[in-house]
Structures are given as C-alpha cells and as structure tokens.
C-alpha cells in the first residue's frame, strides 16, 4: 500500500480514521458487504468528485481497522473485567478523494460497553500523539480534545504529519449506546489540503452525528 508508514501511524492513533465540479450529493445509501452496512453514525453532503469505493485498497483499510478494533476491545475488556461482546466493524465506507489526493474512512465499530469513553480517548490520544511527535511522525497538533460539532460532542484530533500529510479524526460515543463507536478519519496527501479546503469545510458544515 502506498504511504504505508503514514497509514500505520493513522491506524495507531485510531486504536485508542485540482478540485473539479460544483455542488454536493448525499453519501450513498446502505449496501451490505459481508454483513457490514455503509450507513454509519455520520451523515454529511459529500463533494461530487469524492467517490465511495469498495476496491482493494478500501478492503485493506477495513481489515486493518477491524484487527485494530479487536485488539483495542480485548484490552478494554481486560482492564474492566467486562464481558467482551461481539466485536468488529458494523458499518464502513471508504471514500477516495479526487486525483488520488487522499482518503476519508467513515465507520462504526462495536466494542465491550464503556463508561466515560470520550475522556478515555482524549487521554489515550495524548499519549499516542506524544509518541508520534517523538518519532517525528506528527509535526504539529492543530486541535485535540472534546469539541462540539453541530450540537454533538465528539473527540477531535487534527494533525499535520511528516512529509506534509494532513489528518483529521473524529470519534463519536454516547452513554445511550455504550458498545458502539463512530469514527471519521480524513487523510490528505502532501500539497493537496489547500486545494481541498473548501470541500472539507463544506462537508464539516453539513455534518450530523448520531
């Protein structure tokens, strides 16, 4: 996989995801794939030239995320002594940005029921990002912590990374569904962020969560 090392860092953080054309479209309706739907906790208007794909790269991302999720769930169950419920990806979308300029991964996973999960994620992200900075992978932390997006609290991590990559991660969890976590992970390749910024801002402005 291209840029494997950067993606390893992005997936590590997860364990704890010329513009042409105008207007936007709603993201695709649910489609089953090995029992996994594409209807996630995040709803947004997708820029017209951002394409949902079920190709080989998307499947690699899905498998890596599922493996990481299972490792995370085992750790949480071990820490809390809780029964480990069915673990894995329940919904998944991989969206290719135009001209090979990056990816948006949007997915929902099930884990053992958690308490105060968002604050736990904040603590874990700080540790992992500190490691990333020490290794020279993360070059700048633009935002990190619990924020409100259109009335919903999420954990947001916004990073500049080695070689000029740009990464935004959003995590959604609520006590009403303590065994489900929603994640959006946007990774933009070097040199493409300025070109895509308007599309990214419009997507975030239409974002509804829950």
Image (spheres, rainbow, N blue to C red):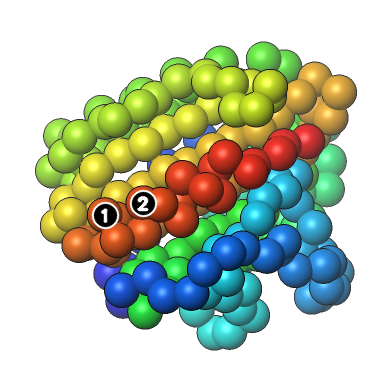
Residue 18 horizontal side relative to residue 53, left or right: left
Spatial CA span between label 2 and label 1: 5 Å
On the image, the x and y values in percent for residue 29 come to 82, 67
Q: State whether residue 109 appears in this view.
A: no
Q: Residue at x 58, y 84 (%)?
A: 55
Helix, strand, or loop for circle 1? helix
- Of all residues, the one furthest to the front in this rendering is 22
Which mark, residue 197?
A: 2
Q: State whether residue 190 appears in this view.
A: yes
Q: Residue at x 60, y 27 (%)?
A: 149
On the image, the x and y values in percent for residue 133 come to 19, 35
Vertical position of residue 164 compared to residue 99: above or below? above
Residue 163 horizontal side relative to residue 180, left or right: left
* For the residues bearing labels 2 and 1, Cβ distance under 8 angstroms: yes
Q: Which residue is mark 1?
A: 194
Please state which of residues 58 and 70 is positioned toward the viewer in this rendering. Answer: 58
On the image, the x and y values in percent for residue 106 come to 62, 55
Quarter of the image with the N terminus in it: bottom left
Vertical position of residue 104 compared to residue 21: above or below? above
Task: Count all numbered tags in the image, as a single digit.
Answer: 2
Vertical position of residue 75 compared to residue 45: above or below? above
Residue 148 horizontal side relative to residue 37, left or right: left
Quarter of the image with the C terminus in it: top right
């Amino acid at each position: 996989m291209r840029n494997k090392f950067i993606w390893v860092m992005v997936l590590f953080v997860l364990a704890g995801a010329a513009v042409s054309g105008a207007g936007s479209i709603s993201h695709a309706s649910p489609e089953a794939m090995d029992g996994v739907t594409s209807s996630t906790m995040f709803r947004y208007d997708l820029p017209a030239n951002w394409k949902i794909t079920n190709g080989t790269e998307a499947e690699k991302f899905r498998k890596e995320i599922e493996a990481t999720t299972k490792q995370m769930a085992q750790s949480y169950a071990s820490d809390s002594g809780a029964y480990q419920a069915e673990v894995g990806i329940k919904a998944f979308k991989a969206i290719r940005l135009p001209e090979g300029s990056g990816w948006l991964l949007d997915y929902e996973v099930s884990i053992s029921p958690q308490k105060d999960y968002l604050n736990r994620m904040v603590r874990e992200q700080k540790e992992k990002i500190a490691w990333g900075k020490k290794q020279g992978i993360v070059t700048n932390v633009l935002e990190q912590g619990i924020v409100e997006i259109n009335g919903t609290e999420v954990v947001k991590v916004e990073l500049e990374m080695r070689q000029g990559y740009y990464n935004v991660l959003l995590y959604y969890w609520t006590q009403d569904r303590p065994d489900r976590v929603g994640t959006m992970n946007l990774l933009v390749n070097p040199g493409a962020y300025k070109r895509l910024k308007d599309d990214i801002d419009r997507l975030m402005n239409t974002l509804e969560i829950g």
